[in-house]
Each structure stands twice: as structure tokens, then as C-alpha cells.
């Protein structure tokens, strides 16, 4: 069922795309694969804020990695737009050094690849032992640069999506599912 909200003189409509049940089932599959790949190695899971927080929380609770540390990094390339601006901004950095550590970067969505490329280039200068990327969503139609993605939850069409941590102008993160956002003018 669509969610319809009137905001600033227009209608924002969110049509379901990926259900909460589908998300949770896919997270279990990803967690099993990640856990098997890392085995008993110590891992630092890095949550790319803010959009990844729900995915990250559910994912790390499903991992069977015994020596797991977590850290957070804030980045932005959207602002209040529905497409990436192409300008990547670091809004907060990691709290500890990562040199010699295995990193699992957890992202909400990879579309242009610019944010992830910036992030990976930044991390490589800090000399981690390895870097793997886990993204909930991959939107290949918007790709501008090729970036490695080791674990992908869902591949989606070129639509603007919200929910399950993803937002539009800081709204709709709390939705349990992922939906496609549409904008409509109010009738005159």
C-alpha cells in the first residue's frame, strides 16, 4: 500500500519496492556469506551514516564473527536532492586507526560510485589489511565510476528510494520497507 503525504504544497507518494521480510531474509544470507568469508579473523565493520544505520544494525547482529568491532563514518552526497550531487562530503570520521585491520564497509546504496570511490581511496591511505564493501542496494544505471562491491543485497532500477534508513530530506528513514518515491503536484 502506498504512503501518501502532503509536504510543502505537493504530494509525496511512496510505493513499496522491497518488503521488510525480503530485507530481513537477504540480510541473513549476506551475514552467512560474510561470516564464512572472514572466519575467525578480527573485523572492523564501518557503518556509513546516516542511511546505513538500520541495515548495519541488523547485519552485525546476524554475523557470527566473534572478534567484531564497529565504527561509524558520516558522508553525504545528496543533501535534500533526489540525485547525487557528485560532491562528496565527509561529515564525521572514524574514531580509531584502521591500519592493519580488515574492514567491512557497510553502505545503504551504491549508485554513481563516487561516494564509495572517495571513501575507498581515503581508507586505502590508512593502510588497512583489507577492505570489503557490503551494500544493501546497488543501482547500476547511475554508475559513473566502477567500484568493488563484495556483497550486494538487492540490485534496483534507477528510481529514487526511501525507507529502511534511506531518506528524502531527512524523512522516511523509519520505514520498515524500501519504497520508490514519487512527487505529484496538488490539484489546483
Image: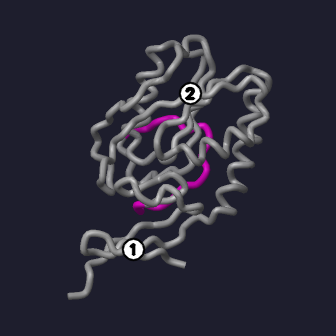
Residue 150, magenta (yes or no): yes
Percent coordinates x, y for residue 95 in the rendering: 50, 20
For the stretch drawn in magenta, what is the main secondary structure?
A: loop
**Which of disc 1 and disc 2 is earlier in sequence?**
1
Secondary structure state at the residue bearing disc 1:
strand
Rendering quarter of residue 36: top right
- Residue 117 placed where, x, y %? 41, 32
Label 2, residues with CA under 10 Å away: few <14, some 14-19, many ≥20:
some
Colour convention of the picture: one colour
Residue extending farthest left? 188
Dot 2 and dot 1 residues touching (CB under 8 Å): no
In the image, is 11 to the left or to the right of 44?
left
Residue appearing at x 45%, y 51% in the figure: 140
Look at 46% across and 27% down and name the residue there.
120
Q: Is residue 78 magenta?
A: no
Residue 133 % position (x, y): 56, 35
Residue range in magenta is 145-160
Vertical relation: 181 (above or below) 79: below
At x 28%, y 74%, the residue is 10
Q: Which residue is mark 1?
A: 5
Q: CA distance from mark 2 to mark 1?
A: 35 Å
- Quadrant for the C terminus in the image: bottom left
Residue 16 lies, with reference to residue 113, above or below; the image says: below
Amino acid at each position: 500500500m502506498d504512503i501518501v503525504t502532503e509536504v510543502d504544497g505537493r504530494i509525496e507518494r511512496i510505493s513499496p519496492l522491497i518488503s521488510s521480510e525480503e530485507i530481513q531474509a537477504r540480510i541473513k544470507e549476506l551475514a552467512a556469506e560474510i561470516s564464512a568469508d572472514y572466519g575467525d579473523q578480527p573485523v572492523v565493520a564501518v557503518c556509513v551514516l546516516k542511511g546505513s544505520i538500520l541495515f548495519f544494525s541488523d547485519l552485525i547482529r546476524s554475523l557470527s564473527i566473534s572478534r567484531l568491532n564497529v565504527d561509524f563514518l558520516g558522508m553525504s552526497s545528496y543533501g535534500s536532492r533526489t540525485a547525487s550531487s557528485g560532491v562528496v562530503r565527509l561529515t564525521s570520521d572514524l574514531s580509531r586507526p584502521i591500519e592493519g585491520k580488515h574492514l567491512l564497509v557497510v553502505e545503504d546504496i551504491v549508485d554513481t560510485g563516487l561516494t564509495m570511490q572517495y571513501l575507498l581511496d581515503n581508507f586505502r591511505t590508512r593502510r588497512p589489511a583489507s577492505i570489503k564493501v557490503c551494500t544493501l542496494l546497488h543501482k547500476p544505471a547511475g554508475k559513473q565510476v566502477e567500484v568493488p562491491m563484495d556483497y550486494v543485497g538487492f540490485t534496483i532500477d534507477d528510481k529514487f528510494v526511501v525507507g529502511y534508513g534511506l531518506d528524502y530530506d531527512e524523512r522516511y528513514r523509519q520505514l520498515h520497507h524500501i519504497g520508490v518515491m514519487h512527487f505529484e503536484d496538488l490539484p489546483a
